[in-house]
Image (cartoon, grey):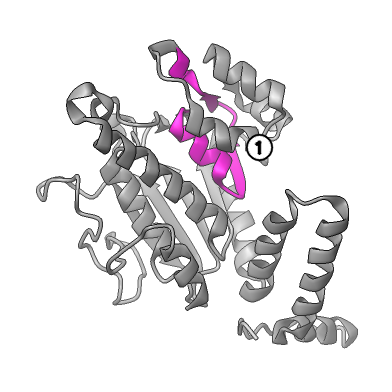
């Protein structure tokens, strides 16, 4: 339960449940109850939906009428879906996508009015930050599948994912400055995904960039025609799902751990990780299979 323990440190509490779709092949442990409940009326539908098939969990932002705004309820629902069974070997990769023409318009501005108060505002931004850190610290890769506009915290969500695939009609912006609310928290993820001067132009002007520009600057991994978006995203997800979970998990954690280090420390950390990787059952299985000219049979055991 190591991964769950680490992830729960970022503030998730209570049982984790996913909503059953009519076609979702989920385990019986998945349920429709909203463990994050607060901030959402019981009569309102859950703002995200999720299904998991063949190791691939698809999480969908499901409030297109509100442009998939990252309200507190949406953030808590997304947090729950990300955390559910994080340690399970059945989970290999997560895809985050959205219904409608807007991936996410960012925070719900109705929650940021003076009437809501400073404490509520702090809760919104703290919860959002926790969700973004959950993605970074999750043991499996998280892919953003974007078809449309992603602005402010919506752009932050894309930048926070490990991989991002977008349709060629998508666009990205941090327009908060135009309404008097600088996109400071989106800037954290943005500055870690694109060059500083690109990030600052987006933050200072609020002007959008196209999918091709986002690809050029490193915000996206791939840009494809809209008709090919799901196929290409699933191709990447299936490839990851076919690999050893503990090897991928160790690799992801090591990549982010070494990233801010100086060169010597980075090589020291990654050398240790290579030795740890060789100690994994799947590390030895992969090498043995290669030498024997056969396909590896992954155990997915952590040690």
What residue sits 50% from the left and 23% below the top? 174
Is 136 rendered above or below residue 177? below
Q: Which residues are magenta?
A: 151-177
Residues 286 and 199: in front is 199
Residues 113 and 67: in front is 113
Q: Position of residue 195 (x, y in %)?
A: 72, 29
What residue sits 56% from the left and 66% below the top? 139
Q: Is residue 295 visible?
A: no
Left or right, 26 with respect to 44, comes to: right
Q: Residue furthest left?
A: 43
Number of callouts: 1
Which corner quadrant of the image does residue 303 belong to? bottom right
Which corner quadrant of the image does residue 219 belong to? top right
Give the residue number, with chain letter if any, for mark 1: 193
For disc 1, the neighbor class at 10 Å (few under 14, some 14 to 19, many from 20) is many
Q: Secondary structure at mark 1?
A: loop
Q: Position of residue 261 (x, y in %)?
A: 77, 51
Q: Is residue 217 visible?
A: yes
Left or right, 250 with respect to 237, comes to: right
Question: In the rendered structure, does residue 60 fall within the stretch colored magenta?
Answer: no
Question: In the rendered structure, does residue 161 fall within the stretch colored magenta?
Answer: yes
Q: Position of residue 86 (x, y in %)?
A: 46, 69
What residue sits 31% from the left and 66% below the top? 16
Is 113 rendered above or below residue 4? above
Q: Position of residue 197 (x, y in %)?
A: 70, 21
């Amino acid at each position: 339960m190591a991964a769950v323990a680490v992830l729960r440190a970022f503030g998730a509490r209570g049982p984790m449940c996913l909503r059953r779709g009519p076609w979702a092949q989920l385990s019986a442990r998945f349920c429709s109850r909203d463990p994050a409940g607060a901030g959402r009326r019981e009569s309102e539908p859950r703002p995200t939906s999720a299904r998991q098939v063949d190791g691939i969990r698809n999480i969908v932002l499901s409030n297109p009428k509100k442009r998939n705004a990252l309200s507190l309820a949406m953030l808590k629902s997304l947090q729950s879906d990300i955390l559910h069974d994080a340690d399970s070997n059945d989970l290999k990769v997560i895809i985050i996508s959205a219904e409608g023409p807007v991936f996410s318009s960012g925070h719900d501005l109705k929650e940021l009015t003076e009437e809501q108060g400073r404490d509520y505002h702090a809760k919104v931004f703290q919860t959002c930050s926790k969700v973004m850190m959950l993605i970074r610290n999750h043991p499996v890769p998280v892919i953003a599948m974007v078809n449309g506009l992603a602005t402010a915290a919506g752009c932050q969500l894309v930048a926070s994912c490990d991989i991002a695939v977008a349709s060629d009609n998508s666009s990205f912006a941090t327009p908060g400055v135009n309404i008097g609310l600088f996109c400071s928290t989106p800037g954290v993820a943005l500055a870690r995904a694109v060059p500083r001067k690109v990030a600052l132009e987006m933050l200072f002007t609020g002007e959008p960039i196209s999918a091709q520009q986002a690809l050029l600057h490193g915000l996206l991994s791939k840009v494809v025609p809209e008709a090919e978006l799901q196929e290409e995203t699933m191709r990447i997800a299936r490839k990851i799902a076919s690999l050893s979970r503990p090897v991928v998990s160790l690799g992801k954690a090591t990549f982010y751990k070494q990233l801010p280090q100086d060169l010597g420390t980075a090589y020291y950390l990654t050398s240790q990780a290579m030795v740890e990787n060789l100690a994994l059952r799947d590390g030895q299985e992969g090498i043995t299979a290669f030498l024997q000219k056969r396909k590896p049979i992954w155990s997915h055991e952590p040690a």
